[in-house]
Image: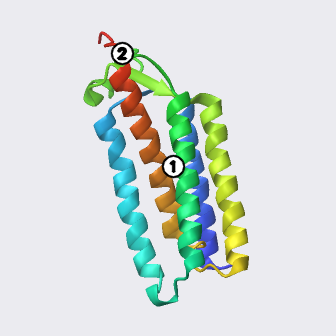
Amino acid sequence: MTLQTIGNALLIVVLIGWIGFRQLTWRPVSIARMWRVPAIMAIVGVVLLVQATDATHLTALDFAVLLVEIAVSLGIGAWMGAIAVFRPLSGPREDPDAILHSSSVESRTGWWGLALWVLVIVIRIGIDVIAARAGSHLATSTGIIVLLVAANRAARTAVFAYRLDRMPAVAA
């Protein structure tokens, strides 16, 4: 087992815990704030890819794997945004930081959102194993994992923004 494999496993466990917790708890919705995480993760993912990948050894298979994984991640992220439940903000008693979010609603995706998140991981591992056996060098990169999480969160945020624009105003 290599250090990169251990690092990837640790990253996956941390991301599952962090996003899993967020799927199950009511969180104030602030679209501007929600865009920050995918933006930062995308930058980190690209930097990790550039540092770890030799561009001269990339193949069409590497790009195909990347496109398939991003498409799956975007699709499941949009699905997560579509199943999210919104409710009027409970108030500062339950979330002391709610005032800082300047939101009138909160959301969660619940157990279905967590199940979709696990599906992203399972598909990622399956594609990684198949692609690595086929000779893809890019599929096993930590940068790809970070980019896929960024794509998932970006699609979820885009669907949230769309749904909230169509939602009747909620009194704060």
- Of badges 1 and 2, nearer the viewer stands 1
Q: What residue is shown with label 1?
A: 74
Q: Quadrant of residue 137?
A: bottom right
**At 51% across and 57% down in the image, what residue appears?**
148
Q: Kindly identify the amino acid type of the residue bearing the numbered disc 1.
A: Leu
Left/right of residue 145 with respect to residue 30 in the rendered view? right
Left/right of residue 155 with respect to residue 15 in the rendered view? left
Image mark count: 2
Q: Quadrant of residue 7?
A: bottom right
Mark 1–mark 2 contact, CB under 8 Å?
Answer: no
Q: Position of residue 10 (x, y in %)?
A: 60, 62
Q: What residue is shown with label 2?
A: 91
Q: Residues within 10 Å of mark 1 (few under 14, many from 20)?
A: many
Alpha carbon of mark 1 to alpha carbon of mark 2: how far?
32 Å
What kind of element bears circle 1?
helix
Q: Is residue 82 visible?
A: yes
Q: Residues within 10 Å of mark 2 (few under 14, many from 20)?
A: some
Instruction: Answer with mark 1 or mark 2, whichever residue precedes in sequence.
Output: 1
**At 40% across and 57% down in the image, what residue appears?**
41
Q: Is residue 66 above or below residue 51?
A: above
